[in-house]
């Protein structure tokens, strides 16, 4: 399973269930994630699913961890080896691109729009810290003089909040095409980054 990074090695059924859960979220959204939907995709019975997971909350938690891993893999491959400013912008572009290409996975991971779905708060150390990745890139920009050296956490929050706001506007249909949104997003992030310098 992509994004699994060693999760549940040796348990093929558990991985099959998580693959099915990921596909349910990808196609239908977090709100449709259920043991019934997973059973339909895997051919397993609901009781068989419960032999591998304690309940829906654990399935949701593990599925979100898989989605986080997928996104973190994209962040890791966005590193341009060199220019801190370009690295930061490339990382921020990952948010935009993930929202366009994987809208329901983006919603599940960042917006948690699933009504009534138990979304546990977790401090799972097996999953990457996405915000810390952005803070690291902001810190590199501060060291390089691209942005003010004071407050990399505050700067990272500003950049992430700006990114999320633009993506929400896109999801509400305010930009028309994905191409227009991409251009506006890139220009707006560069403007914000200039304002932080």
Image: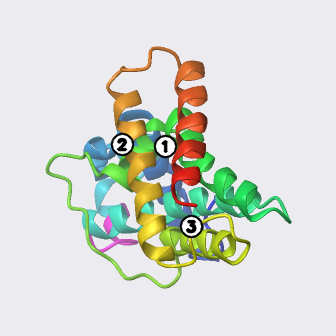
Q: Residues within 10 Å of mark 1 (few under 14, many from 20)?
A: some
Q: Locate the C terminus and report the quarter of the image it occupies.
A: bottom right
* Residue 171 in which image quadrant: top left
Residue that label 3 marks: 134
Q: Residue 154 or 122: which is nearer the viewer? A: 154
Was residue 121 drawn as part of the magenta stretch in this picture? no
Q: Locate the N terminus and report the quarter of the image it occupies.
A: bottom right
Residue that label 2 marks: 165
Q: Residues within 10 Å of mark 3 (few under 14, many from 20)?
A: many
Q: Residues within 10 Å of mark 2 (few under 14, many from 20)?
A: few
Q: Position of residue 186 (x, y in %)?
A: 60, 37
**Can residue 73 be seen by looking at this rendering?**
yes
Q: Which mark, by number, is residue 23?
A: 1
**Can residue 39 be seen by looking at this rendering?**
no
Q: Residue at x 76, y 58 (%)?
A: 77
The span picked out in magenta is 49-55
Q: Position of residue 5 (x, y in %)?
A: 65, 71
Residue 29 is left or right of residue 20, and the answer is left
Q: Position of residue 62 (x, y in %)?
A: 42, 67
Distance between the alpha carbons at the discs numbered 1 and 2 = 26 Å
Q: Residue 151 or 62: which is nearer the viewer? A: 151
Distance between the alpha carbons at the discs numbered 2 and 3 = 17 Å
Residue 182 is left or right of residue 109, and the answer is right
Compared to 126, does 106 lie above or below?
Answer: above
Q: Residue at x 54, y 57 (%)?
A: 16
Q: Position of residue 168 (x, y in %)?
A: 35, 37
Distance between the alpha carbons at the discs numbered 1 and 3 = 27 Å
SS for callout 1: helix
SS for callout 3: helix
């Amino acid at each position: 399973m992509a994004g699994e990074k060693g999760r549940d090695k040796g348990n093929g059924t558990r991985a099959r269930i998580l693959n099915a859960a990921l596909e349910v979220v990808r196609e239908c959204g977090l709100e449709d994630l259920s043991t019934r939907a997973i059973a339909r995709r895997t051919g397993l019975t609901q009781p068989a699913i419960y032999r591998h997971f304690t309940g829906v909350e654990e399935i949701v938690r593990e599925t979100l961890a898989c989605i986080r891993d997928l996104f973190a893999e994209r962040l890791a491959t966005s590193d341009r080896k060199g220019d801190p400013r370009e690295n930061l912008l490339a990382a921020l572009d990952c948010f935009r691109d993930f929202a366009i290409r994987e809208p329901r996975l983006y919603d599940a991971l960042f917006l948690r729009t699933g009504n009534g779905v138990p979304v546990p708060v977790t401090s799972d150390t097996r999953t990457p810290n996405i915000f810390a990745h952005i803070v690291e890139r902001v810190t590199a920009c501060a060291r390089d003089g691209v942005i003010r050296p004071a407050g990399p956490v505050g700067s990272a929050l500003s950049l992430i909040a700006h990114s999320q706001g633009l993506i929400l506007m896109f999801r509400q249909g305010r930009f028309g095409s994905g191409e227009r949104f991409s251009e506006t997003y890139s220009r707006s992030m560069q403007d914000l980054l200039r304002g932080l310098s």
